């Protein structure tokens, strides 16, 4: 789909409004394929029933043009901003916030945003520092990529961080990831994507885990050491027997993705972020002239 807008801030706002709803209604093809494949290979009867129900749920959402899950999550955007893109990031943030509000009010969507202490609703899925936006700046480019990943609370609550010591090594990382997922059981609506962030610092490791869940399912890290760990964890996690919705079975996770960063010689941070079966994501590419292309990947 392609549109042309003369007002660049309006174009970004329109894109955000579309992305949030699109992500919630129409899950990506790689996720559909992974769920169908999981349904076919699951051997436990309760697990297979759960997966059949999930696949049917997606079909009904398609035919009714409705959401795949009632939890509209918190809107999390990742922006890649070209240095020559003709809209300042402060205005991009305004546009993303306005787009999130419009999507919530116009669809309408459930508004989940509350003050973290008073628990009072703060607005149409917006509030202080909501939506959440991650930024990356690209030199020598005049475009903007926006990815929207609505994050449901069931899976977000199953987030874990451990500052392993370097002597724990790769086995320490594996142990922590496995313990985290076993402890989570059925709470994060499995089977989903286990995102793991390793290296960097405590906060950056969690950011990396979040990046990992937003990748197309089954893609592998460019670093062969990390890719090997992804494969090993994927197999180990499915040997836990937790199964779909924690009812037991062969398919506990659809995949395991890892993002990494180099780190201090005495650090070994490991973060785990779960993404449920409704692993929603959608992207838009905004050109300097205001034209917008919608795509799955940013
Ligand atoms: S964790 Fe995911 S599937 Fe479960 S209720 Fe939340 S958004 Fe829906």
Image (tube, rainbow, N blue to C red):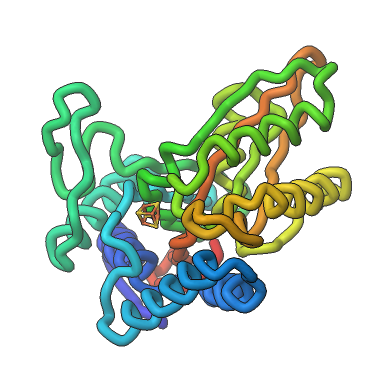
Q: Residue at x 19, y 35 (%)?
A: 114
- The residue at the far right in this view is 224
Closer to the camera in the image, 119 or 123:
119
Residue at point 41% right, 82% down?
A: 1
In the image, taking residue 27 as reference, residue 31 lies left or right, namely: right
Residue 115 lies left or right of residue 46; in this view the side is left
How many discs appear? 0
Q: Is residue 9 above or below residue 94?
A: below
Q: Position of residue 143 (x, y in %)?
A: 50, 60
The residue depicted at 65 percent of the width and 37 percent of the height is 197
List the single residue furthest toward the bottom: 63
User: In which quarter of the view is residue 44 placed?
Assistant: bottom right
Q: Is there any visible trace of residue 180 in the rendered image?
A: yes
Q: Which residue does the image show at 43% across and 71% down from the upper left?
A: 54
Q: Is residue 10 above or below residue 196?
A: below
Picture quadrant of ligand 1: bottom left
Confirm whether residue 141 shows in the render.
no
- Depth check: 151 or 86 in front? 151
x then y, percent, for residue 223: 83, 47
In screen coordinates, is 91 left or right of 51? left
Q: Quadrant of the C terminus?
A: bottom right
Residue 249 percent coordinates (x, y): 61, 60
Residue 62 percent coordinates (x, y): 35, 82
In the displayed structure, 138 sits above or below 286; it is above
Front residue of 277 and 119: 277
């Amino acid at each position: 789909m392609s549109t042309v807008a003369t007002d660049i801030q309006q174009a970004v706002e329109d894109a955000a409004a579309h992305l949030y709803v699109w992500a919630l209604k129409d899950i990506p093809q790689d996720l559909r394929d992974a769920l169908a494949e999981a349904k076919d290979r699951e051997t436990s009867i309760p697990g297979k029933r759960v997966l059949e129900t999930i696949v049917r749920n997606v079909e009904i959402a398609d035919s009714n043009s409705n959401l795949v899950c009632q939890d509209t999550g918190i809107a999390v955007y990742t922006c890649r901003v070209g240095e020559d893109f003709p809209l300042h990031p402060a205005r991009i943030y305004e546009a993303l916030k306005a787009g999130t509000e419009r999507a919530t009010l116009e669809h309408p969507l459930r508004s989940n945003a509350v003050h973290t202490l008073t628990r009072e609703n703060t607005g149409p899925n917006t509030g202080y520092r909501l939506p959440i936006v991650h930024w990356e700046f690209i030199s020598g480019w005049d475009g903007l990529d926006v990815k929207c990943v609505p994050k449901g609370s069931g899976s977000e609550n199953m987030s874990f961080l451990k500052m392993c010591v370097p002597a724990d090594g790769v086995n320490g990382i594996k142990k922590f990831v496995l313990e985290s997922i076993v402890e989570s059981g059925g709470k994060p609506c499995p089977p989903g994507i286990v995102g793991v962030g390793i290296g960097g610092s405590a906060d950056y490791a969690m950011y990396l885990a979040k990046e990992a869940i937003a990748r197309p399912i089954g893609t592998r890290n460019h670093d062969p050491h990390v890719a090997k760990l992804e494969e090993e964890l994927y197999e180990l996690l499915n040997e836990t027997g937790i199964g779909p919705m924690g009812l037991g079975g062969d398919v506990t996770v659809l995949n395991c993705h890892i993002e990494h960063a180099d780190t201090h010689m005495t650090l070994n941070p490991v973060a785990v972020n779960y993404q449920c079966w409704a692993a929603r994501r959608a992207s838009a590419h905004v050109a300097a002239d205001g034209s917008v292309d919608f795509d799955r990947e940013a």
